[in-house]
Image (tube, helix red, strand yellow):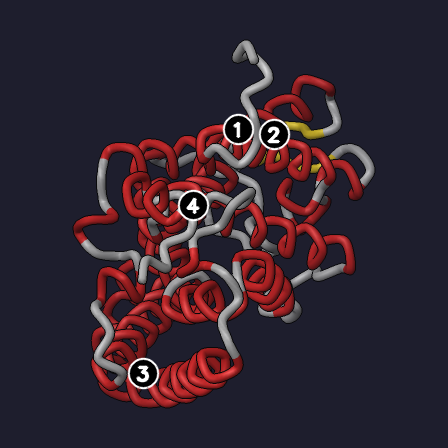
Amino acid sequence: MNTTRPGDADFRATGRVVLGDPPTSLMPGPPLRRMVAAGRIGAFVGLSLVALVVVPALVYPFVQLANAAAGTRLIGYSVIGCVALLVATAVAVRIFREPWREATRLGVDALGAWPVVGGLSAGWFAIAIPTGLLIWLGVLHVVPAEPGNWEEGALLALAILVPAALTEELALRGYAFNLLLRAWGPVAAIGVTSVLFGLLHLFNPGVTALSVTMVTLAGVFLAAVRLAFNSLWAAWLAHLAYNFVQAAVFHTTVSGLAIPQPNYRTVSAGPDWLTGGAWGPEAGVAAAGGMLVVSFLLAVHAGWVRNPLRPR
């Protein structure tokens, strides 16, 4: 008997989630499927916690060398988290005998021109345009800072942000996201992981209710990237670009954390609700506007909404 529903073939061919008529594989599953998914999510969380204890003990000497060379501990923390989540994910998919590429969407098949260019562009423009607009309006000021080499500052930012972004994507929009997607559907997967994304930033310096809300919205935005391109590569690169623009282009704080950058800084000269204040531009409503606009373009690309410029 043919159990294929309309939308299944589109998903297999394009790799996009058709929200209007979702494929069977992305519809909420029966109770047994949900129980299995919940058990595997619990196992993945447990493996991640164990890895976060074991990995630091194994790589500590190398982390110390990296910290000493860079003059900051942020690189070591980022690398430890990244290695731990990679190990936990690899062990989980091995235990449950799931193909890496389908379980994580971080395989070679998910790495192509569209996910790379689309992910980088989505993250870049979502924050660069609103931040540039705030500078033009005069509510963000560019002020002098200690002189130095821009390339070295950018490389330092990349060394911190590349593993940090992958860590968070593996934790929230990798294997666990796929399990939520298969058992409960896209709305639950986006909602649960985005709320957790916001809560994970509760202990960052200068946290406020607005900053946590905005990080939660960023989680929705990154989940949209993940689904629009059916690729964790795309979400990772969008996450990286979003943070890199703030740290290395505008020289602002990122989620309340300051990455040392030379020559100039961009500081708030307006209301925190608009500019993000000490947390960085991502905590202001201007950034929300940027994410919403890019999310709409992603929805058009994925076919979730009709292109308003295309004739009926």
The amino acid type of the residue labelled 3 equals: Pro
Q: Residue at x 35, y 62 (%)?
A: 75
Q: In whole angstroms, how far apart are the C-alphas of marks 3 and 4?
A: 48 Å
Q: In whole angstroms, how far apart are the C-alphas of marks 4 and 1?
A: 24 Å
The amino acid type of the residue labelled 4 equals: Pro
Q: Which residue is mark 3?
A: 56
Residue 162 x, y percent position in the rendering: 34, 53
Residue 225 x, y percent position in the rendering: 45, 44
**In the image, is 295 to the left or to the right of 178?**
right
- Looking at the picture, tell me which residue is in the foreground, 128 or 299: 299
Asked if residue 159 is positioned above or below residue 171 in the image, the reply reads: above
Q: Residues within 10 Å of mark 2 (few under 14, many from 20)?
A: some
Residue 89 x, y percent position in the rendering: 30, 74
The amino acid type of the residue labelled 2 equals: Val
Q: In whole angstroms, how far apart are the C-alphas of marks 1 and 3?
A: 40 Å
Q: Which mark is first along the chain, 4 or 2? A: 4
Q: Where on the picture, by quarter, is residue 257? A: bottom right
Q: Which residue is mark 4?
A: 6
Residue 212 x, y percent position in the rendering: 69, 59
The amino acid type of the residue labelled 1 equals: Leu
Asked if residue 32 is positioned above or below residue 71 in the image, the reply reads: below
Image quadrant where one finds the C terminus:
top right
Q: Looking at the rendered structure, which numbered label has been put on residue 297?
A: 1
Q: Which residue is mark 2?
A: 293
Image quadrant where one finds the N terminus:
bottom left
Q: Residue at x 45, y 30 (%)?
A: 301
